Amino acid sequence: PFFSFFSDSQLEEIISDSKEKPFQKDDFIVREGDKAQYIYLLTRGVATESCKSSYKRIKERLEIGSIISYHQIITGHHRYQTSNSP
């Protein structure tokens, strides 16, 4: 769904500018409070996204097709969640 609004030529440009970056188990993709430099598309495996709130820790499992850190790149805000490869 994230890429559904792009034209074919825009998708081709995105694909040509993309690079694969493998992560090992327990590697951090982006840590809470850090500024992300890239948008990550999960193409294999799973990741866990978590954040601390004032009353509990929220944790979400991300699967193939999930996008990580796009909101941060678009808005320029610092990361409010941690994403890692479980």
Image (cartoon, rainbow, N blue to C red):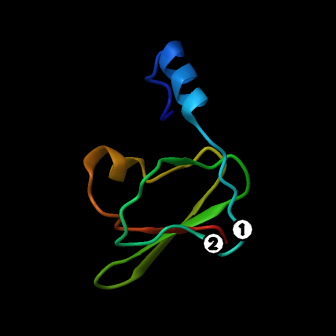
Give coordinates of residue 69: x percent, y percent.
43, 53
* Residue 6 occupies quadrant: top left
Camera-side residue of 68 and 38: 38
Q: Circles 2 and 1: CB distance less than 8 Å? A: yes
Camera-side residue of 56 and 81: 81
Tell me if residue 20 comes above or below residue 56 in the rendering: above
Q: Residue at x 73, y 51 (%)?
A: 44
Q: CA distance from mark 2 to mark 1?
A: 5 Å
* Residue 47 occupies quadrant: bottom right
Q: Residue at x 47, y 15 (%)?
A: 7
Q: Residue at x 63, y 49 (%)?
A: 42
Total marks drawn?
Answer: 2
Task: Identify the disc placed on residue 7.
Answer: none
**Image quadrant for the C terminus?**
bottom right
Give coordinates of residue 50: x percent, y percent.
47, 72
Label 1 secondary element: loop
Indicate left or right for 63 with 79 as reference: right
Q: Residue furthest bottom?
A: 55
Give coordinates of residue 37: x percent, y percent.
42, 54
Q: Which residue is mark 2?
A: 27
Label 2 secondary element: loop
Q: Which residue is mark 1?
A: 24
Task: Estimate how packed mark 1 is, as few (under 14), some (14 to 19) or many (20 or more) residues with alpha carbons within 10 Å.
Answer: few
Q: Residue at x 51, y 14 (%)?
A: 9
Amino acid residing under circle 1: Gln
Tell me if residue 16 comes above or below residue 29 in the rendering: above
Task: Estimate how packed mark 2 is, as few (under 14), some (14 to 19) or many (20 or more) residues with alpha carbons within 10 Å.
Answer: few
